[in-house]
Image (spheres, rainbow, N blue to C red):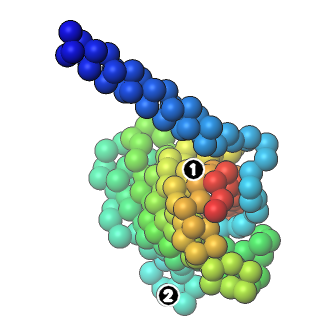
Amino acid sequence: MRNLVAHKSCFLVLFLLLLFTSQFSSATKKTFNRDQPCKRFVLYFHDILFGGNDVANATSAAVANETGLGNFKFGKLFVFDDPMTKDKNYLSPAVARAQGFYFYDMKNDYNAWFAYSLVFNSTEHKGTLNIMGADIMAAQTRDLSIVGGTGDFFMARGIATFETDLFQGAKYFRIKMDIKLYECY
């Protein structure tokens, strides 16, 4: 009889503990509103592909050639160190650098996968935002994940919406990035 009472007491304590922790976790759970990010800004990503004789101006280079599977550069890998400006002008002061890589990852259409850091070192912001995801080039806008950050963007999470602003063949492209952070600390 004594063991039965002890088991019931133990069960009651466990039940109350579980109830308390579930209430506590739901009370501290953040809710997000897509229309109200905690921080939002627009930057322009400028990429000049190295063409063999433009070392001074190039901001990216192919480091692995395509595989020959399909007609869409499948497997081709690029590294970049691109200036980020607040406006469309490539010669405007850079407010950050986009440093990372992308590669073409689809055999039957143009599609790229990006992984990079926006490195801020200005009077306005210091730190990084880390961005990764698929750039489905045929779509007018594409969302990539902001998966973290440092400095002024410590542990930030959100979305970077890409929109191709200018495309000049394989030589130069400019992407408008609408950056929306939903977790800001």
For residue 98, say whether it is visible: no
Residue under label 1: 144
In the image, which disc is placed on residue 130? none
Quadrant of the rendering where the N terminus is positioned: top left
Q: Nearer the viewer, residue 30 or 152?
A: 30
**Residue 128 point in image, percent of width and height:** 56, 72
Q: Secondary structure at mark 1?
A: strand
Figure quadrant of residue 149 = bottom right
Residue under label 2: 55
The local crowd at label 2, few if under 14, some if 14 to 19, many if 20 or more residues have their Cα within 10 Å, is few
Left-right relation of 108 to 179 = left
Query: Which three-letter amino acid code belongs to the residue tagged 1?
Result: Leu
Figure quadrant of residue 103 = bottom left
First in sequence: mark 2 vs mark 1 = 2
Left-right relation of 42 to 102 = right
Q: Secondary structure at mark 2?
A: loop
**Residue 147 point in image, percent of width and height:** 51, 55
The local crowd at label 1, few if under 14, some if 14 to 19, many if 20 or more residues have their Cα within 10 Å, is many
Left-right relation of 41 to 1 = right
**Up-down: is 57 above or below 170?**
below
User: Disc count in the image?
Assistant: 2
